[in-house]
Amino acid sequence: MATNVYMEALSPTMEEGRVVKWHKRDGDPVKTGETLAEVETDKAVMDLVARADGVLRQVAAAEGQTVAVGSVVAVIVAPGENVGATAAAATPATSSGSGKREGGNVATAAAPAPVAVAPLPTVAPADATRVKASPLARRMAKEAGVDLKLVTGSGPGGRVVKKDLERAPSPGTPAAPGATVAAPFPVSRVLPPERTGAAYQDVPLTQIRKTIAKRLATSLGPIPHFFLTTEVDMERASEARDALNKQLGDQGGKVSFNDIIIKATAHALTKHPACNAWFQEDHIRYWHEVHIGMAVAVEDGLITPVIRNAELQSLADIGREAKELAERARNRRLQPNEYTGATFSVSNLGMFDIDQFTAVINPPEAGIIAVGSIVQKAVVVDGQPAVRRRMRITMSCDHRVIDGATGAAFLKTLKQMLENPLAMLL
Amino acid sequence: MATLTYRDALNQALREEMQRDPNVFLMGEEVGVYQGAYKVSRGLLEEFGPTRIVDTPIAELGFAGIGVGAAMAGLRPVIEFMTWNFAVLALDQIVNSAAKIMYESGGQIPIPIVFRGPNGAALQLAGQHSQAWESWLSHIPGLKVVAPATPADAKGLLKSAIRDNNPVIVLEGEMLYNVKGEVPEGEHIVPIGQADVKRPGSDVTFVCHSKTVTVALKAAEQLAEHDGVSAEVLDLRSLRPLDQEAILGSVARTNRAVVIEEGWPHAGIGAQVVDIIQREAFDQLDAPVLRVTQADVPMPYNKQLERLAKPSPDRVVAAARRVLYLD
């Protein structure tokens, strides 16, 4: 009995994958769960694992070759089972619209096989990406805003069932129904409540907010951005950084400006929860936790690994985590859960001598801070000219969630935190 | 509260209803002089005399028809079948007369009749005498069908059946007649159409009735003991009408169900219950609903084969483990 090895969807958005390296060769014995190959997805390099015990045969995708999700890249057969065919080019599992479907996709891939691999009831690629879940699990996931694709199912055939969702980490349970009732127009919108232990609360859109959302979304691209810039005096932050790094000495894990900015941003977001939110079409999700997406340039693009609960972490911890995530991001070794789920983002081009720029919001987040370089400038301090280290930060806001004054108030707090880092201790 | 056998609870219900209403009478094979094939009518001939406790020849279609005629004339007959296997001969009167006359007379002629007797298998009575007919009988619009599992429910449902102005089928059980339980004295009525939670639970619902209630309760005990699983046992009690609200309420609590019945799987009562669950509680389900039924064969005479053919606690436990994803 042969089992096809498919190019699997190893990230939520993956459509094709490049085989980086085969760990197993034609003829090698393999066990269920063993890594067969490394595959580069659109986001990272992931392991393609064996789904059956047996011997790997008919490796049909060469290293470096890019193949579509759902393609058969090899087969696993029982020891001694004769498949007789030579490796063939990877072919998508679906029969192209042109006509009759042949015995199985391996048979189509390897034409002159003396003993064809058993014509298996093939799994169409659509099935590979469809999430199997019980009706109850679907309802629970919908209510909790959980993406079923990210939940590992423990039921038969990987079916996601109730207990898998009860185990799933955050986003937690929705708040009491009473708290989420939309205030009828013209009462002003429901403000984010005090932290209750739940990871977030869904607040339905009021009529006025729906109208704002609809109208603004038709203006500047799908997301109506607006931008707020302020210049921050970084003298004290610089002094603090120098002092902290002296303190850390040779222990390693030096604190960077970026770490300080992430910490300050997270701290400021806890004071302005209206900016720590996701736009969700018919409601706004106000997060009670702060997960900061940190834009990292990689060879051919960028990715935003997430510093979880940045508001609760020490500067040293943020520094270590940021460094480690950035390094793995550059090596394309991030797991999907490490680059999804941010509630707000920070993008820093200071090291490129950029004075100021505007960053594009990473939906469904509602805001992002663009950080420029720190430069010495002549400024007036207490009526006297002085040379100070200054930095310009620009916040991009999703106007459907954040209004001008809301964003400005947040930015002012952030500026105060950075200009007086001790305030973060309060 | 007195502890009575199921048999004596039925006897009490008959006696009380006959004392209460002179139009009620009992008719069937061996109900009088012999005091009932299973002694359900013990002492009734003595108390009510031969005009109200009527022995009949072995002629099921005939005395069922006499009963329907008496009901048309305003009496309230209780027709006893020695077993429902023999009532197959009387189905024309039950289905074509009793169930239709009210409808086809434009509501002018109610048929307040009760057809009762033991249903399903006992022990080693073989294929022709071990049949559970509830899905046949519940199929018919115009009939009500009840299947009590306990002495208290037997008394309460038989009283409701006798007072109902429609034909009511009461399915008893040879293996139930000796079951003992507390029975409220006097006016104890169990309304037709109300299920009863015989054991509350939170992890899986066992929908059952009649003899399978005991099977489900045993399975629930095993699961609690060995797997820490809390099973809810829902006794349907009435099969037509079905207590949809109780079924859905229980499934909403447990998200999983196993439906148990004595009859065969094909087009059984359980299929109807599963239809309700999948249609009305789709978003409550965490697993497909499974059924435990008699094997799809005529009941074997061989003792071991008969045991294997019947729903058993072990089979219910196995089904429960599957819907709980424990296997």
Image: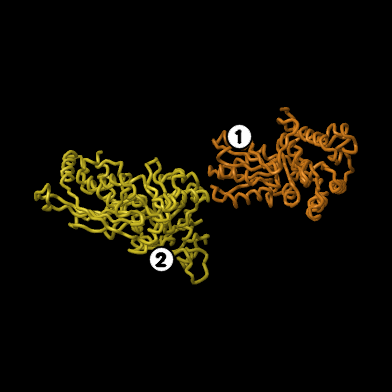
Chain A rendering hue? yellow
Q: Amino acid at mark 2?
A: Ala
Which of the two discs, 1 and 2, sits closer to the camera? 1
Q: Amino acid at mark 1?
A: Glu
Percent position (x, y) of residue A128? 46, 57
Q: Which residue is mark 2?
A: A89
Both marks 1 and 2 on one chain: no
Q: Quadrant of residue A197?
A: top left
> Quick check: B37 left or right of A326?
right
Camera-side residue: B118 or B126?
A: B118
The local secondary structure at tag 1 comes to helix
- Chain that bears disc 1: B
Is disc 2 surrounded by few (<14), some (14 to 19) or many (20+) residues within 10 Å?
some
Chain given the colour orange: B
Residue linked to disc 1: B221
Task: Using the image, name the chain to which the residue with label 2 belongs.
Answer: A
Quadrant holding the C terminus of chain A? top left
